[in-house]
Amino acid sequence: MRGPQWLERGMHHVWLPYAQMQTAPSPLPVVATQGRTITLADGSELLDGIASWWTACHGYNHPHIRQAVQAQLACMPHVMFGGLVNEPALTLATRLAALLPGDLERVFFTDSGSVAVEVAMKMAIQYWLNRGERGRTRLLAFRGGYHGDTMATMAVCDPDEGMHSLYAGALPEHFMAELPVDAASTQALDNLLAQSAGQIAAIIVEPLVQGAGGMLFHSPDVLLTLRQLADRHGVLLILDEIFTGFGRTGTLFACEQAGIVPDIITLSKALTGGTMALAATVARRHVFEAFLSDNPLHALMHGPTFMANAMACACANASLDLFACEPRLTQVAQIEAQMRSELEACRHLPGVVDVRVMGAIGVVELARIADMNALKAALVAQGVWVRPFRTIIYLTPAFTITPAELSRLTAAIHTVLAHQGQV
Ligand SMILES: *Cc1c(COP(=O)(O)O)cnc(C)c1O
């Protein structure tokens, strides 16, 4: 079967993400999305199980978001944020400050998650410089973590996944530790901080779920421990909620489950409901205040061209409207309960080593995936869009998914795994 002409022509000219272009199977040409459905060029449909890298939390083409984009497009698609401000951006900043816990109240807008993390890193490092403490130029990050693909963020990703050895010499070196999940790892982290806090600007962690590192869960106690250790040793705490933010783990923000307030938080992925690129780095008052002085060098020197894009901010405001007036967190709880019961059937299938669910994240972990391409093709053949990676098959559906649709997703995973030998 031949694809549309734009596919054949264009495939000679695009460079795809995370793909060995010599051997990767052809990507699927998409012509439309609606709700939880992805329509391909040949008219066939896939039921989406992962909401476009965890962004489309209300489903695709939600009329409220579409209407907000159209209205914003008609009056002002974009205006620079240097010296000028716009209503959607300032309203969004005000709303985020009200939704976030504690005094997380200063919002710096960017256009991707990686850049939001880079801004958080710059804020943390310069926070200490502005206060006259030199030498705190390193971050403390965790194995299994993922914070982005740019050079600076790769350096705080898991050393293997972040390809630290391949890029040796090109990446700054930071401290890497195990998450403090038990007494021994907590003691080890405490010791590391006791020795090296003078070199450390901040601890950075994905709260409750290390997403791209393999959907690895930890308890809220780990976050409580991190907050205590950061306070005891006088370093900042950055929570990267780019994946977990906006309901994914069952609360609007994951940090709420531990009752802690980080010094800086990063948000993106579901911020605009998956419609436009936007990210935010939000700082507590004391972090912001460290940049206030009569010295121009104490200012935060960062400013992406498209920061605070009015259409993207209008999208995010519309997305927050939907969290306020539609029962999103209740839907997440229902999705959690349904995935818990339905994915359980996978636990005893051959090769399955774990089944775990948190909020609207459902994971089936395998001992190994022998033929990733065959597994992906088998899932597509079931009519679902689910994208396994490493050793996991996971679901992070739109919160608006219906019980019947969710059952189709869990059944597709079960069917494919049950027939694994034939794949
Ligand atoms: C996706 C992600 C990022 C990077 O965001 P991009 O928009 O892809 O740059 C950073 N941190 C976490 C936790 C993420 O899930």
Image (tube, helix red, strand yellow):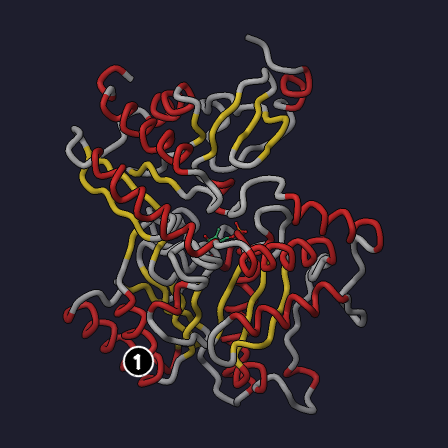
| Residue visible at 62% across and 69% down in the picture | 108
Vertical arrangement, residue 236 with respect to residue 164, above or below = below
Q: Nearer the viewer, residue 397 or 333?
A: 333
Residue position marked by numbered label 1 in the rendering: 228
Q: In which quarter of the image is residue 3?
A: top right
Q: Using the rendered image of the protein, determine whether residue 123 is visible from the camera's viewpoint.
A: yes
Left or right of 387 on screen, residue 301? right
Secondary structure of the residue carrying tag 1 is: helix
**Label 1 Cα crowd, 10 Å radius (few <14 / some 14-19 / many 20+):** some
Residue 260 position in % (x across, y down) = 37, 75
Residue 8 position in % (x across, y down) = 63, 17
The total number of labels drawn is: 1
Residue 205 position in % (x across, y down) = 38, 64
| Residue visible at 52% across and 61% down in the picture | 267
| Residue visible at 43% across and 56% down in the picture | 329
Vertical arrangement, residue 275 with respect to residue 109, above or below = above
Q: Identity of the amino acid at label 1?
A: Gln
Left or right of 375 on screen, residue 189? left
Q: Quadrant of residue 355?
A: top left
Name the quarter where the N terminus is drawn.
Answer: top right
Extreme-right residue of the structure: 75
Vertical arrangement, residue 195 with respect to residue 57, above or below = below
Left or right of 301 on screen, residue 143? left
| Residue visible at 33% across and 61% down in the picture | 142
Q: Using the rendered image of the protein, determine whether residue 169 is visible from the camera's viewpoint.
A: no
Residue 84 position in % (x across, y down) = 80, 69
Q: Nearer the viewer, residue 66 or 355?
A: 66
Name the quarter where the C terminus is drawn.
Answer: top left
